[in-house]
Image: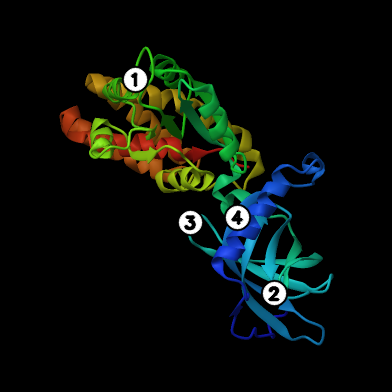
Amino acid sequence: MSSQQTAAKAVNVRIDDATAKRILNQLDDIRANSADADRRAHERFSFHKTCLIELTQPGGTVLSVKAPVGDLSRGGMAFLYHGFIHVGTKGRVQLVTTRNSRQFVEGTVVRCEYVEGGIHLVCMQFKHAIDISSFCCNTTPKRILMVDDDAGMRKLVGVHLKQLNVEITEAENGEEAIAAVGAGAFDVILMDIEMPKLDGVETIKQLRESGYGGNTIALTALSAEGDRERLLQAGFDRYLAKPVTKESLTQALVEIEAEPLFSTMADDEEMFELINQFVDDMGAMVSELEKATAKGETEAMKRIARSLKGKAGSYGFEPISTLAQSVESLLAADTPPAAMVKTTRELIRMCRMARKPS
């Protein structure tokens, strides 16, 4: 579309939110179970946002619509429209980055298929490949620790989260959960309460006392009055009562997890390997900082904060560097560790948000 063309006021696609959500979820399920997924040029990710799309029709008229987008990849996207759009139609879509800035991406319609009730699925191929991680939060797997003594429940949660980009580690009880946390990094822990050997309440107590500051959700059949408050008070961040559905579980994960933090140098391919190595190394540093904070070991905390301050900014993670400097300054002023728990946990949380370039 030339700079001389002006799009008319955008109109909404004629479809209600509930129908759009149902159709996009069905398409997600079809895509996830498709046999040709491994043969696609670019991996597709669920996007499910309403985007401004401008299409140049024959004769130069510009059609401007706000349409529900289904999936997004480096090379293109799919959206819903209340009519047929000819293959070969040129246009552009306004995508919003994870940092809330807007960017127009040019493309061409390559397929238009009827779905139902006049609604079509329109597939657009981008003129140039995009950095998918700048727009879609689920390009990197969510690392989930699922703790439940019921193998059927662990499997059910895996099925419910199949359409999301997740890596699930399983544990049968609290003892296994504590061992898993010590061996790896997780974005969210989903934990049952009534378990043998070590129940959920005692497990979260021991994790918090050891300095663990990650996101935790109590996934339990306990639903009597006061159970929710008791579990939140025990150290859980969220409470989700069984039975769980795909919708309730997905919503809980969306609410609890912050958007990933990507390096400002992620567009430089020469930096990929260096950034990846730093993110891997930072996992061990975070675990060490958690333990040092729990034990009140100020010298170890100073050393780790100083290291994070210097390295994080060098690899494009400026927010981590800024918080690390705050922690270092507080320690230099002889602030007791107990009085700076909030700042230290915020630093740990920010470090856990760091992701590798896609």
Query: Tag 1: residue type?
Result: Asp
Q: What's the distance in space between the residues labelled 2 and 4, CA to CA?
A: 19 Å
Q: CA distance from mark 1 to mark 3?
A: 39 Å
Q: CA distance from mark 4 to mark 3?
A: 15 Å
- In the rendered view, does 131 fall on the left or right side of 254? right
Residue 242, image x and y in percent? 42, 37
**Residue 199 circle label:** 1
Which residue does the numbered mark 2 point to in the structure image? 82
The reply to whether discs 4 and 1 touch (Cβ–Cβ < 8 Å) is no
Which residue is rendered at x = 45% and y = 38% of the image?
Answer: 243
- Label 3 packing within 10 angstroms: few (<14), some (14-19), many (20+): few
- Nearer to us of marks 4 and 3 is 4
Q: Position of residue 228 (x, y in %)?
A: 28, 39
Q: Are the residues flagged by discs 2 and 4 in contact, CB closer than 8 Å?
A: no
Relative to the observer, which residue lies in front, 96 or 197? 197
Q: Name the N-terminal-most of marks 4 and 1.
A: 4
Residue 324 in sight: no
Q: Which quadrant does the N terminus fall into?
A: bottom right
Are dots 4 and 3 in contact, CB under 8 Å? no
The earlier-in-sequence mark between 2 and 3 is: 2
How many C-alpha atoms fall within 10 Å of the one at disc 1: few (<14), some, or many (≥20)? some
The answer to whether marks 1 and 3 mark residues whose Cβ atoms lie closer than 8 Å is no
Q: Residues within 10 Å of mark 2 (few under 14, many from 20)?
A: some
* Alpha carbons under labels 4 and 1: distance apart: 37 Å
User: Dot 4, crowdedness within 10 Å: few (<14), some or many (≥20)?
Assistant: many
Answer left or right for 196 relative to 267: left
Which residue is disc 4 drawn over? 47
